[in-house]
């Protein structure tokens, strides 16, 4: 099973993100928009791994403490358009602890540098050029009270994310 560890968002953040996606559509942006139920912040991508209990144990060992996050800025990686987060030392410190616990447990994960972003659109295209105009970046803030272990399955209409466990 394909696994990843993520922050799932409250309704305020989801509403801000989906409202922003609607504004982008109205401006003529096309692509594969992330559905509201799939909006999340990935902390560690594990990939194919068949022992979710071991991952939950490593998550438990990571000494999670609640912290706040805030939406801040947009950008892209090629044709992937994303929303960023305000600089957050508590988030980065937690991800470092989490990844250390995963490594100590021998659980493989993508070791790319953590770059907190929320994927809004894959294969983004703008009919008027390469740069997507952003006039009003959404604001949103939430308290992160838990972290989720998620399973990713390919469905008929795209990816389906299911929470396997939470700490």
Image (tube, grey):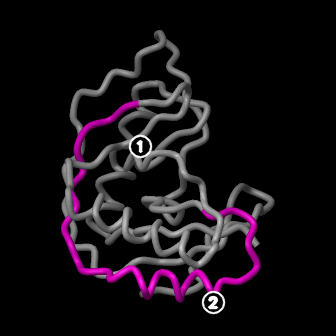
Going 51% across and 62% down the picture, which residue do you hit? 44
Side of 123 where 13 appears, left or right: left
- Spatial CA distance of label 1 from label 2 is 35 Å
Question: Upstream in the sequence, badge 1 or badge 2?
Answer: 1
Find residue 78 and report its horizontal and vertical position in percent.
54, 25
Q: Does the magenta stretch include residue 4?
A: no
Is residue 122 placed above or below 14 in the rendered structure? above
Find residue 154 and report its horizontal and vertical position in percent.
77, 61
Side of 147 where 51 appears, left or right: right
Going 32% across and 68% down the picture, which residue do you hit? 94
Kindly check if marks 1 and 2 are in contact, taking CB atoms under 8 A apart as contact: no
Q: Is residue 65 magenta?
A: yes
Instruction: Indicate the secondary structure of the residue bearing disc 1.
Output: helix
Image mark for residue 72: none
Q: In which quarter of the image is residue 55?
A: bottom right
Is residue 159 placed above or below 104 in the rendered structure? above
Stretch of the chain drawn in magenta = 46-75
Find residue 101 and report its horizontal and vertical position in percent.
47, 75
Going 47% across and 10% down the picture, which residue do you hit? 129
Find residue 134 and report its horizontal and vertical position in percent.
29, 27
Instruction: Indicate the secondary structure of the residue bearing disc 2.
Output: helix
Q: Quadrant of residue 35?
A: bottom right
In the rendered image, which residue does mark 1 sit on?
21
Image mark for residue 53: 2
- The C terminus, quarter of image: bottom left
Going 73% across and 72% down the picture, which residue do you hit? 49
Side of 133 where 61 appears, left or right: right
Residue extending furthest front? 104
């Amino acid at each position: 099973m394909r696994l990843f560890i993520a922050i799932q968002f409250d309704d305020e953040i989801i509403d801000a993100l989906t409202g922003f996606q609607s504004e982008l559509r109205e401006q003529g942006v096309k692509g594969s928009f992330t559905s509201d139920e799939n909006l999340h912040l990935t902390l560690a991508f594990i990939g194919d791994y068949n022992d979710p209990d071991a991952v939950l144990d490593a998550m438990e060992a990571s000494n999670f403490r609640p912290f706040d996050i805030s939406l801040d800025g947009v950008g892209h990686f090629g044709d992937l358009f994303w929303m960023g987060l305000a600089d957050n030392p508590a988030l980065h410190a937690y991800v470092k602890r989490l990844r250390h616990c995963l490594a100590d447990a021998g659980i493989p994960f993508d070791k790319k540098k953590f770059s907190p972003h929320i994927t809004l659109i894959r294969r983004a295209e703008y009919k008027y050029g390469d740069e997507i105009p952003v006039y009003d970046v959404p604001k949103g803030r939430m308290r992160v009270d838990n972290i989720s272990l998620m399973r990713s399955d390919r469905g008929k209409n795209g990816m389906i994310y299911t929470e396997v466990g939470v700490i």
